[in-house]
Image (cartoon, rainbow, N blue to C red):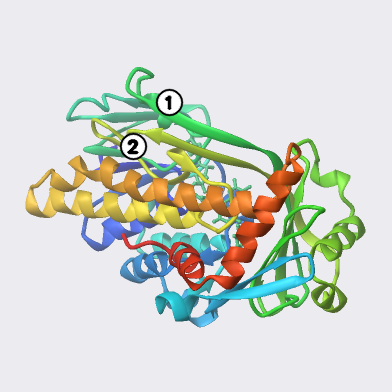
Amino acid sequence: MKTQVAIIGGGPSGLLLSQLLHTRGISSVVLERKTKQYVLSRIRAGVLEQGLVGLMEEAGCAARLHAEGIEHDGTLISYGDEMFRVDFIEHTGKPVMVYGQTEVTRDLYDAREKVGGQIEFNVEDVVIQGADTEAPKVRYTVDGQAREIDCDFVAGCDGFHGVSRQAIPLEVRREYEKVYPFGWLGILSDTPPVNNELIYANSPRGFALCSMRNEKLSRYYIQCSSSDRPEDWTDAAFWQELKRRIPDEQANKLVTGPSIEKSIAPLRSFVTEPMRWGRLFLCGDAAHIVPPTGAKGLNTAASDVHYLYNGLRDFYENNSTNGIDSYSEKALARVWKAERFSWWFSSLMHSYPDQTPFDLKMQVAEIEFLRTNKAAQQAMAENYVGLPY
Ligand code: FAD
Ligand code: DHB
């Protein structure tokens, strides 16, 4: 098989890149290790920056997002029984959009299928060859049968556990990592959200987040131990713990119900450099991970797609390598800012096992500063709604 861009990974990065390239007549094939049902069953991010909304529009996939997504003009931050709001519109003029990653992915699959986009599911043993030549190849198997794609470029959109990053030689690759000593236990429930805006809660018992997917579907998270498993937590224990971490006023009006999904995500900061090696480009979680506080994971994947898509367009439409040559540098400049924000917001909101009384006082002082200082709120709002591409 022959294509212009071989895309490894059928998550949001791979699908968005494939659909954007299609709008410019650039061909691609997406290789996905799992089934479509499996990819769509993973509950992940829920807050989209305007940059990602804009890319979905450019890809011709934003109709449902605009019909069903909910614009949020601010967010609430609580500590103990204190709560304050950071107003995104006042500080940046921009809202964020609440619309689940699952729905973004579904819309992209629908769009790819409508135009006959090539996606291979259940692929195994993916190997990238000749990324440092002008004629790379991707070899893989499906149902035990060997297949091969000849291409101009390879986009590694295969997430943190994918093979693309490993294809970059160790002597070229530099990795930076911080693992946090806790996880997030998340549940999805068919209940109305406790509040019409998100609540990020710092409490002596640990962090909690009240989020949503729509006015009938809630998404809640609590900080948990790294060694916990979802089956250790009954729904009743989850709700009880959540109520103890949010202000009484919210806890008293929280509507509980059976969980329809329950999972634990570890928290990690990770960046690999460079994000390009020869004709292989890494995009999204394949190159970097942020802790979820601040909802930057999916949005940072989207900014990578923006830079790569424009670089590839420049190559095919203007015969210029400027865009692809500067891809890694441009993408990483924005990635590191998202890493900083996610690390800062995580540090502000979680309980750390080795936190001293001094550390705790510093955390409270910083939250107090954010509550009372417009410049601090402005900095937070600018990062939350998304820094410019
Ligand atoms: P992925 O979504 O990981 O997609 C990669 C795809 O590649 C997958 O479909 C995978 O099956 C496929 N793949 C892997 N290896 C191979 C291979 N060898 N061959 C072919 N295909 C392969 N972000 C937020 O902003 N907010 C959140 O609340 C949030 N929660 C998260 C919870 C969890 C458990 C995880 C793991 C991530 C979460 N994130 C969150 C991060 C966000 O979901 C990711 O940043 C986003 O999914 C990145 O998209 P991606 O397409 O780059 O990678
Ligand atoms: C969600 C996840 C986040 O990490 C976040 O900061 C906000 C919302 C969510 O899944 O809804």
CA distance separating discs 1 and 2: 12 Å
Kindly tell me whether mark 2's CB lies below 8 Å from ligand 1: no
Q: What element carries label 2?
A: loop
| Up/down of 309 relative to 125, above or below | below
Residue at x-position 17% and y-position 30%: 134
| Up/down of 133 relative to 109, above or below | above
- Please state which of the two labelled residues, at mark 1 or mark 2, is closer to the viewer: 2
Image position of 201 (left or right of 274): right
**Residue 336 drawn at (x, y percent):** 40, 45
Image position of 351 (left or right of 161): right
Q: In which quarter of the image is residue 3?
A: top left
**Residue 200 drawn at (x, y percent):** 67, 64
Type of amino acid at the residue the image marks with label 2? Met
In front: 100, or 374? 374
Label drawn at residue 4:
none
Is the N terminus in the top left, top right, bottom left or bottom right quadrant? top left
In front: 216, or 140? 216
Q: How crowded is mark 1: few (under 14 residues within 10 Å), some or many (20 or more)?
A: few
Q: Which residue is tagged 2?
A: 275
Label drawn at residue 166:
1
Q: Is mark 1 on a helix, strand or loop?
A: helix
Type of amino acid at the residue the image marks with label 1? Gln
Residue at x-position 87% and y-position 49%: 233
Residue at x-position 85% and y-position 45%: 231
Q: In which quarter of the image is residue 310?
A: bottom left
Residue at x-position 73% and y-position 75%: 193
Image position of 366 (left or right of 49): right
**Residue 387 drawn at (x, y percent):** 38, 61
